Each structure stands twice: as C-alpha cells, then as structure tokens.
Amino acid sequence: MTDAKDIIKDTVTSNDVVLYMKGTKSMPQCGFSSKVAGVLNYMGVEYADVNVLADEGIRQGIKEYSDWPTIPQLYVKGEFIGGCDIITEMTLSGELDQLFDEHGVSYDKDAAEKIREANA
C-alpha cells in the first residue's frame, strides 16, 4: 500500500485541484462523482481526475490516505476538502468560491453564482 500512498501524495501535492472519482471528468461512472465533476466542469476549474476504478490499490489507498470511506474525494492544494455532500454544500453556500479564491484557483464566478441561483 506504500506505493499507492506515495502516488496519491505526489498527485495531490503536484496538482492544485484533484478529484478522485469513479470514472473520468468526461465520463463519470457514478452519480456522486458525476455531480462533483459537473460542478467543477461547469465552474471551469482545471483539475486532475483520477479514476479509482482503474486501480484497486489507488481505490483503497485514497480511503486510507484521507481517512474518508467514500469516493469521490476532492483535494485543493494538497488538502482533502470532502466528498459529494460536502462539495455540494460548499458550492451552494459560496464556501467553495472562498476556498478557490484563498488558494489562487481560477474558476468562473458567474457560473458559481448560476449554480446557486438554480438551487435557491
């Protein structure tokens, strides 16, 4: 498992935003992964997507790395942010915008506002 943890650490520290998900950002393979990828895609966030279905070591390793049992998992600047429910709440409250602003991650502010308006 050490190899998987080393790979995960390298991935989350060498990319500003990383989404560990089932499937890919262009073809999610579960509803929760699709929801988070959809938010990031709509907001125009550049992020690395890691398909946990392609590597069982990574799939199990990411759960241990974050001490979080479910997929998807979002990381910003090496920090674990959360899964689908947390990202949804942060998006609707504006906290995700603040997090991106604080870490210098570019995103479409108008798109973020449209998400909130559509869910008001």
Image: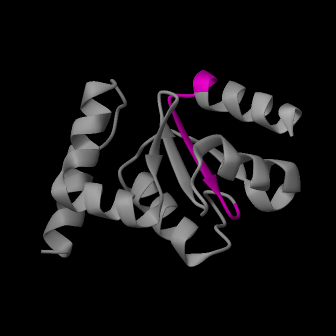
Q: Quadrant of residue 30?
A: bottom right
Q: Is residue 75 magenta?
A: no
Percent x, y of residue 117: 14, 68
Locate the C terminus and report the quarter of the image it occupies.
bottom left
Percent x, y of residue 84: 45, 64
- Residue appearing at x 19%, y 74% in the figure: 118
Q: Is residue 21 left or right of residue 53?
A: left
Q: Is residue 61 visible?
A: yes
- Total labels: the figure holds 0
| Magenta segment | 13-23
Image position of 55 with respect to 31: above or below: above
Q: Nearer the viewer, residue 25 or 67?
A: 67
Image position of 47 with respect to 114: above or below: above
Percent x, y of residue 113: 17, 56
- Residue appearing at x 40%, y 59% in the figure: 39
Locate the N terminus and report the quarter of the image it occupies.
top right
Is the image coloured rainbow, by chain, by secondary structure, or in one colour? one colour
Q: Nearer the viewer, residue 78 or 35?
A: 78
Q: Is residue 100 left or right of residue 30?
A: left
- Residue appearing at x 57%, y 54% in the figure: 68
Q: Quadrant of residue 33?
A: bottom right
Percent x, y of residue 14: 62, 22
- Residue appearing at x 57%, y 59% in the figure: 72
Q: Nearer the viewer, residue 72 or 2?
A: 2
Q: Is residue 55 visible?
A: no
